[in-house]
Image (spheres, rainbow, N blue to C red):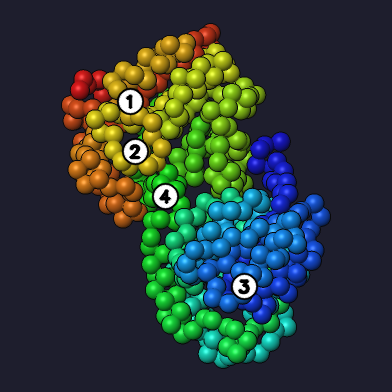
């Protein structure tokens, strides 16, 4: 059985109900009581994280009393009023569950819908679930212009984010903790709703929508949102659609690389002559190179991050020659998957620099790989190019001349080839990351680089310099030595250039 077919169901244990509150003295107690009484799917326990956003009424006093009565309710108070988004961020920071549900402190939403909200996640189909007020449930009839405004905002959000939600502004949203906590949220007020939607879309989380019941409030009953918030939401939809601050820098960089298919193809072409027919890729990320590697034969793609693994499963689910497996290069036991798979080639591109104990990784590889297995590693080159961008995406180093070769030999591998890759990239890197201090690579930069890739490939063949990266090909000594690269390949390889 391939790992594409393994059980994807995660054993979730705790649901964190996140309640931001401001001036809700009339409804808070009843709302919390309904939340605590709401049934959950079997096996789940509930914690309630209640954050008061510096209310001016007796909300804080009521919350304090509720926390004293219920041990699974934790109460936090903001020092000053900042808005719903700020209170929600505080709640996210305090939660301990593996699932989260956002719950307003009023009585508009019914906690008895929790099981419906959580079901697509528990079934392994979704990372995020929205509760829609406009699909398939009875609802209280309220303001026409609120509904019209909501539909307009949802339409614009769908156009910007390429989704088909019916209710972007819903306050009922459920998440895996990993998905929710991986998004760097910044909105303080009601802009939090379009921000979450944009960042869910940018992260390509699996998003579902289910019908929920809704008992909307009138302004006399305490409704707070106004037309001004609607106008602000329109701005936030546009702002967060084009913001690169939707995930950690490493993921943003990988996503940006999807805008450069010619560059990815160039990287693959540079290592293709050294590949066998039973490949294992370490640190596959979002699978930009995996799509090329799968053409060679059997392929095992690995990573340690569950969000990347889920994306790889979704991408390669229908490819019978591709397996997906978890491999944390810092955990020795995880290397067992390579021992069982027995690859003839291990590919590791732009990964080893992310690991502080890189020599231990090479030692573990030598212990678990079959004799004759070839290693093809690409790593960033030249410590003088190390920049803030390197640091932000988790690079512990840029390799010195001969450093990776020395570490491979020390681990027991024999060096077959070394050559440089992307020589012209040194100049672009120096200008963008050393001189300008750039902290992120943006999609438009990669699109430009992609257009210029044919010229860069030609320059790589004639420039007598080192490159932005170094490629080292080695093998584990043994009788079943892989086929030696052809003379055509040897002629295409640049000679080593000293710095």
Describe the element under mark 1 as helix, strand or loop: loop
Spot the residue most to the top: 479
Q: Is residue 211 visible?
A: no
**What x and y, as percent, mark residue 352?**
43, 29
Describe the element under mark 2 as helix, strand or loop: helix
Which residue matches tag 3? 59
Which residue matches tag 1? 399
Q: Earlier in the sequence, mark 3 or mark 1?
A: 3
Q: Earlier in the sequence, mark 3 or mark 4?
A: 3
Which residue matches tag 4? 252
Spot the residue most to the right: 42
Is residue 108 depicted above or below 479 in this figure?
A: below
Tag nearer the camera, 3 or 4: 3
**What x and y, as percent, mark residue 490?**
31, 20
Q: Which residue is found at the position 46% from the left and 24% from the top?
A: 357
Q: Earlier in the sequence, mark 2 or mark 3?
A: 3
Q: Which label is found at residue 390?
A: 2
Q: Earlier in the sequence, mark 1 or mark 4?
A: 4
**Mark 3 and mark 1: span between their CA atoms?**
57 Å
**Mark 1 and mark 4: span between their CA atoms?**
23 Å
**Mark 2 and mark 1: span between their CA atoms?**
12 Å
Tag nearer the camera, 2 or 4: 2
């Amino acid at each position: 059985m391939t790992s594409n077919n393994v059980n994807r169901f995660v054993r979730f244990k705790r649901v964190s109900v996140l309640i931001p509150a401001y001036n809700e003295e009339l409804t808070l107690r009843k709302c919390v009581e309904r939340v605590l009484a709401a049934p959950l799917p079997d096996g789940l326990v509930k914690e309630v994280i209640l954050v008061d956003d510096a209310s001016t009424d007796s909300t804080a006093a009521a919350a304090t009393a509720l926390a004293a009565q219920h041990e699974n309710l934790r109460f936090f108070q903001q020092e000053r009023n900042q808005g719903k988004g700020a209170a929600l961020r505080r709640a996210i920071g305090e939660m301990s569950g593996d699932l989260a549900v956002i719950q307003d402190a009023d009585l508009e939403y019914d906690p008895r819908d929790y099981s419906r909200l959580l079901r697509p996640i528990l079934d392994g189909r979704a990372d995020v679930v929205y509760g829609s007020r406009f699909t398939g449930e009875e609802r209280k009839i309220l303001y026409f212009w609120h509904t019209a405004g909501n539909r307009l905002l949802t339409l614009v959000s769908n156009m910007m984010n390429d989704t088909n939600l019916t209710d972007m502004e819903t306050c009922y949203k459920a998440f895996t903790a990993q998905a929710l906590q991986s998004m760097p949220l910044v909105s303080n007020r009601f802009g939090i709703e379009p921000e979450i939607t944009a960042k869910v879309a940018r992260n390509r989380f699996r998003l579902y929508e289910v019908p929920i019941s809704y008992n909307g409030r009138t302004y006399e009953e305490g409704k707070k949102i106004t037309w001004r918030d609607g106008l602000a939401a329109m701005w936030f939809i546009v702002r967060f659609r084009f913001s690169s601050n939707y995930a950690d820098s490493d993921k943003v960089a990988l996503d940006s690389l999807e805008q450069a298919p010619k560059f990815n193809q160039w990287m693959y072409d540079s290592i293709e002559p050294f590949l066998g027919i039973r490949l294992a890729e370490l640190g596959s990320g979002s699978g930009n190179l995996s799509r090329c590697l799968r053409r060679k034969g059997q392929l095992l793609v690995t990573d340690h991050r569950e969000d990347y693994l889920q994306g790889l499963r979704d991408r390669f689910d229908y490819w019978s020659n591709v397996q997906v497996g978890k491999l944390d290069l810092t955990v020795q036991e995880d290397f067992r998957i390579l021992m069982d798979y027995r690859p003839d080639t291990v590919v590791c591109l732009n990964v080893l620099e992310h690991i502080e104990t890189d020599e231990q990784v090479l030692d573990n590889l030598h212990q678990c790989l079959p004799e004759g297995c070839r290693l093809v590693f690409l790593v960033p080159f030249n410590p003088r190019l190390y920049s803030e961008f390197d640091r932000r995406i988790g690079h512990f180093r840029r390799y010195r001349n001969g450093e990776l070769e020395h570490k491979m030999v020390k681990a027991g591998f024999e060096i077959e080839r070394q050559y440089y890759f992307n020589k012209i990239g040194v100049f672009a890197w120096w200008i963008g990351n050393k001189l300008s201090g750039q902290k992120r690579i943006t999609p438009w930069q990669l699109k430009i680089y992609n257009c210029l890739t044919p010229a860069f490939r030609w320059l790589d063949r004639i420039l007598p310099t080192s490159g932005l990266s170094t490629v080292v090909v080695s093998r584990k000594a043994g009788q079943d030595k892989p086929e030696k690269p052809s003379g055509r390949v040897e002629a295409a390889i640049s000679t080593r250039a000293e710095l």
